Amino acid sequence: MTTEACLIPYEAVNILVRGAALVLAPHPDDEVLGCGGAIMRHVAAGEPVTVIVVTDGAAGDGSQPVADYVRHRQQESQQAAEILGYGQPLFWDLPDRQLAYGERLVRRILDAIAMHQPAVVYAPSPLEIHPDHQAVALAAAEAVRRCSPPLVLAPYEVGAPLYPNRLLDISALVERKQAAIACFTSQLAVQDYHRHSLALNEFRTFTLAKSVRAAEAYRVVTTVDLAAGLNCLCVPEYWRARGPGSNAAPDRSPPVSIVVRSMARSTLAEALDSIALQTYPNIEAVLVNARGPDHPPPGEWCGRFPLRFVDRGKPLDRSAAANAGLAAARGRYIGFLDDDDLLLPDHVAVLIDALRDQDRAKVAYAGVRMIAYLPDGRIGSESLLDQPFHLPSLRAQNYIPMHAVLFDRVLLDLGCRFDENLALYEDWDFWLQLAEHGEFLHVDRITACYRNFGHSGFGLRPDEARIAAGRAALFAKWGRRWSGTEWAETLAALRDGVIHRQSGRADAEQPMVETLAGNLAEQTALLHQILARLEEQRQQTTALDEQVRRADGLAVAVQTLQTQIAESTRQLEELRRSTSWRVTGPLRWLSRAARRLGGKRS
């Protein structure tokens, strides 16, 4: 049974995280209001603290020149820093109220992490109301997610409560924190943040011992916790509430369409959130109703990105739903996401960067973490699908998950579409179509999560008969199009184990390797059967061709004889019509008569 202690701590700690700290404050004063107590704990332990104030804080009351107001606010942070004892803050001076969650901010935070080597990064909670707080919160979380070795992220609260999993006892520090807050006279003139901060810290003692007079709340997570994305820090309703004008994409960014084939599963909200959290700025979500008339209508926005709903008014199979999405997509580049899978926040940005850096490939794909779930919802196994492109291996088995790929829409102009005659493996068939127009560009980086709940028949208890029928249908389509050399390369790829090498990276992934090996053995047998049938058909065709060649030879001989007979007949007729023939006629009669008389005498 879930207890209150599962939702909020009932004990406070005196040390949040050991080691150097990096504090990201959207504006001058957030570093004190949000985590002033934690800063003092690090200082007392002799651990270095770096505070970065991200914006210039220039969005003031307009009563003084902007430059003077910015300088004043920075001086307030410097005075507070002396009280907290950590040194001097750094100022990035980005425009106040204009921060945007995206690659630029994420990479700048990553640079700061690389420079200062913290053990913990403090940043606002993504549940904050101020847009600058939201942008820094999400960018910091995405930066920590990408870090190796793993880091700790400690979101703090300023203007909105978060859901804490750690409460830091600051009872002995509350007076110093209040003194540091008092340095921000420009802000206290606008609002009594001094009183608000104290009230919030006192409220956080609600579940703690009576001796704790004040506490700071944090939602402490790690790089490992963030491995599947930032959803663990966000409220889906927040992203759906965003609308037009929020973080509009610059025109210079090529538009990207992400097509979601939806059966209205309970996981759809998470899938859409993973699109909303993309760091790439110019995306549209194309939600295709594959379920039918009872699919609930979505909103018009997927976070800051527009969402368009494609509804044909009837259930659609996977191929028909994919083609409906392709028909509706407006982006220069197109990708897919099923409603039970997830994209990591840098997925689109990584693939777009890869495609931009070269002019050869029109298709790029990255690695995917595959998680197979047991019927009770527990994780059964995990593996990585991250194999370099190898066309013979792709012919032998589909090793590229649907949502790993981003491709240029120019391939649609060349006629590539999903084959609606295939009940299974429609994505494999589509990749083979794309591969006819050039190689795929592989990006060796995990940017998506494939969650296998068994919806498609490929779970822990796969429908083997359906899978075999699907492979047979696909090979029947492609078998006649591949040359003998291509078949030989495909079989060699199977024999050498090219396909499943990427799954042998860790002992924990051995079950997936064994599963793939079993599938490959079965598939090899099927390929040999198909090749045998093709060889039999080839031999029959060869025999027929030989008979046709003989018949053709006889026809030529007959034609030659007919020509000779016609020529002889013509010459004979000409001779009969000639004068010499008529003059010698009596002689020919006498000659025949003499032969008859001679015969009678004998």
Image: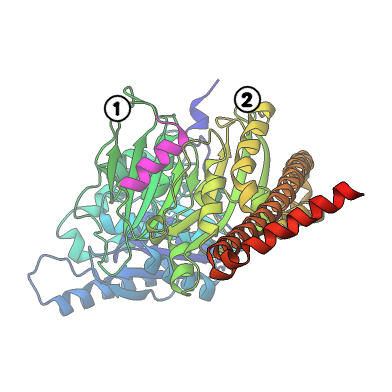
- Side of 524 relative to 377 (left or right): right
Where, by quadrant of the figure, is residue 496 drawn? bottom right
Q: Nearer the viewer, residue 264 or 164?
A: 264
Residue at the right extreme, as displayed: 602
Q: Residue furthest left?
A: 63
Residue 113's x, y, as percent?
51, 69
Q: Secondary structure at mark 2?
A: loop
In this rendering, the answer to whether 346 lies above or below 202 is: below
Density class for disc 2 (Cα within 10 Å; few <14, some 14-19, many ≥20) is few
Q: Amino acid at mark 2?
A: Pro
Residue 212 position in % (x across, y down): 46, 41
Report if the CB atoms under discs 2 and 1 are less than 8 Å apart. no
Residue placed under numbered mark 1 in the picture: 313
As shown in the figure, which amino acid type bears the numbered disc 1? Gly
- Marks 2/1: CA–CA distance: 32 Å
Q: Please tell me whether residue 301 is drawn above or below residue 142 in the rendered image.
A: above
**Residue 365 at x, y = what percent?**
53, 58
Q: Residue at x 43, y 75 (%)?
A: 87
- Percent of width and height locating residue 246: 23, 55
Disc 1 secondary structure class: loop
Judge depth for marks 2 and 1 and give the one in front.
Answer: 1
Q: Residue at x 17, y 79 (%)?
A: 67
Q: Main secondary structure of the magenta part?
A: helix
The answer, for residue 493, to whether it is visible in the render is no
Q: Which residues are magenta?
A: 316-327
Is the N terminus in the top left, top right, bottom left or bottom right quadrant? Answer: top right
Instruction: Residue 91: say if magenta.
Output: no
Can you identify the residue that label 2 sits on? Answer: 375
